[in-house]
Amino acid sequence: MTNNGECLARVVVRAESKDFDAYLAEWADKFEKTENKPVVIGWVAAAVSAFFIAEWLIHLPALDVVLGFPVQLVGLLTLPYLAVRWYVDGNDASKDIEAAAGSIIKKLPGLEKK
């Protein structure tokens, strides 16, 4: 309790066991095992370019009014769902991200497994 009678809630959040270096090593291993390295490099470059172009486009003054608020609203509406899914239900966020990335990779031409 504090001096004015309010109760304080304490939450302990544990970090994942993998650090960033472990993820980099895992990605490097996956890249070394791929047969179509130029295709992978091309898709990664296209994805990074699309991200930066979309970021630039959203922040244009004319489109900021149109797209800025709806994008923020979608983020705010998604946040409670993800909080329930990952914290309350105990699902692992990294597994969800890997599953989403895997489903996208299956659809990209040149990246299918043989």
Image (cartoon, rainbow, N blue to C red):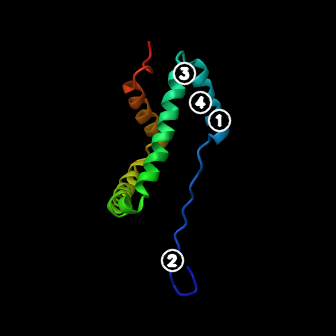
Q: Which residue is mark 2?
A: 7
* Residue 106: image location, x then y, percent: 39, 25
| Residue 22: numbered disc | 1
Per the image, label 4 sits on a secondary structure element best described as helix
In terms of sequence position, does the residue under pointer 4 or pointer 3 come before the other?
4
Amino acid bearing label 1: Ala
In terms of sequence position, does the residue under pointer 1 or pointer 2 come before the other?
2
* Residue 31: image location, x then y, percent: 58, 24
Amino acid bearing label 4: Trp
Q: Which residue is mark 3?
A: 38
Spatial CA distance of label 1 from label 3 is 24 Å
The residue positioned 44% from the left and 16% from the top of the image is 113
Amino acid bearing label 3: Pro
In terms of sequence position, does the residue under pointer 1 or pointer 3 come before the other?
1
In terms of sequence position, does the residue under pointer 3 or pointer 2 come before the other?
2
Q: Nearer the viewer, mark 1 or mark 3?
A: 3
Label 4 CA crowd tier, 10 Å (few <14, some 14–19, many 20+): few
| Residue 5: numbered disc | none
Per the image, label 2 sits on a secondary structure element best described as loop
Disc 3 and disc 2 in contact, CB within 8 angstroms: no
Q: Nearer the viewer, mark 4 or mark 2?
A: 4
User: In which quadrant of the rendered image does the N terminus lie?
Assistant: bottom right
Going by the image, does 89 lie left or right of 5?
left
Spatial CA distance of label 1 from label 4 is 9 Å
Picture layout, residue 29 above or below residue 6: above
Q: Nearer the viewer, mark 1 or mark 4?
A: 4
User: In which quadrant of the rendered image does the C terminus lie?
Assistant: top left
* Residue 102: image location, x then y, percent: 43, 29
Amino acid bearing label 2: Cys
